[in-house]
Amino acid sequence: MENVTTERLAFRAPQPDDGDAIFALMNDFGIVKYLTSVPWPYKRSDADTYIELARTGRAEGKGLYYLILDQNTSEPIGTIDLRFDPEETAHFGYWLGTSVWGRGYASEALAAMLDFGFGTLGLKRIWGAAMPDNPASIRVMEKCGLAHAGTMRVKRPNFGDEVGMVQLDMMRADWLTRGGKAIPA
Ligand SMILES: CC(C)(COP(=O)(O)OP(=O)(O)OC[C@H]1O[C@@H](n2cnc3c(N)ncnc32)[C@H](O)[C@@H]1OP(=O)(O)O)[C@@H](O)C(=O)NCCC(=O)NCCS
């Protein structure tokens, strides 16, 4: 999705020297409390771990990981990723620095990711999950056209517990019905 731009955003794979920027954004419990795989307290080395996960995940064909950039400044403002499941399915995750919440950026990024996943990668189903007390994320998925698809239990290794999450998904046919069109890789 490196060549994809939206009205206000751009995307690129994280690089080794992005650690400081990721740490500065992510070292915020207001973000981490809604995520299942990010440690808290968040350490500077955790940003490097993420960058390495993004590199190996991509190299091994397990997923695609992007920094979300403000198109005007090219500065990172968050991340979005797509992780592959069996049967032409994938699930996504995203977060944004708190200073840019409420501007529609997550919805813009997810819409681009859905176009990329269905239109460019040819996926059949894309899903996401959020904690029930995370209405902003649920709303982002609803705005992008995902439908409620039940609930699931997810382990949070770094918190040592398990949380209930609501799952939302979209099928390729629904994306086409909404006027989805392919975008270049
Ligand atoms: C979830 C997150 C990415 C949303 O980013 P964002 O750019 O602010 O989202 P958008 O502006 O595109 O859309 C947010 C929507 O939620 C709504 N919303 C926000 N807070 C809300 C609340 N407390 N109750 C109900 N709706 C709420 C907004 O009004 C908006 O909907 P609208 O456009 O219909 O008004 C951001 O809050 C975040 O990073 N949270 C922490 C990490 C996280 O939760 N990641 C997702 C894990 S599933």
Image: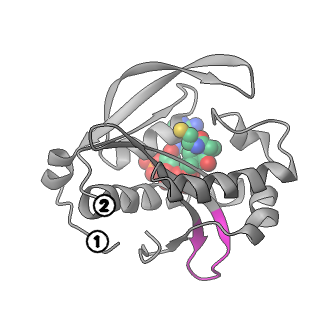
Mark 1, secondary structure of its residue: loop
Mark 2, secondary structure of its residue: helix
Label ID, residue 154: none
Q: For disc 1, does the CB lie below 8 Å from ligand 1?
A: no
Residue 176 is inside the magenta segment: no
Q: Could you tell me which residue is drawn at 51 percent across and 58 percent down? A: 58
Residue pointed to by mark 1 = 183
Label ID, residue 115: 2
- Density class for disc 1 (Cα within 10 Å; few <14, some 14-19, many ≥20) is some
For the record, the magenta segment spans 68-77
Percent x, y for residue 95? 60, 50
The foreground one among 85 and 31 is 85
Q: Could you tell me which residue is drawn at 44 percent across and 61 percent down? A: 108
Query: Which residue is most to the bottom?
Result: 72
Question: On the picture, is 177 further left or further right than 109?
Answer: left
Question: On the picture, is 89 further left or further right than 129?
Answer: left
Q: Count how many numbered circles sit on residues in the image.
A: 2
Question: On the picture, is 30 further left or further right than 143?
Answer: right
The foreground one among 160 and 106 is 160
Percent x, y for residue 115? 30, 61
Q: Split into 4 quadrants, where in the image is the C terminus? A: bottom left
Percent x, y for residue 134? 56, 33
Residue 102 in view (yes/no): no
Question: On the picture, is 119 further left or further right than 19?
Answer: left
Q: Is residue 144 above or below residue 153?
A: below
Q: Split into 4 quadrants, where in the image is the N terminus? A: bottom left
Disc on the earlier residue, 1 or 2: 2
The foreground one among 36 and 6 is 36
Q: Could you tell me which residue is drawn at 21 percent across and 51 percent down? A: 175
Residue 161: image quadrant is top right
Residue 117 in view (yes/no): yes
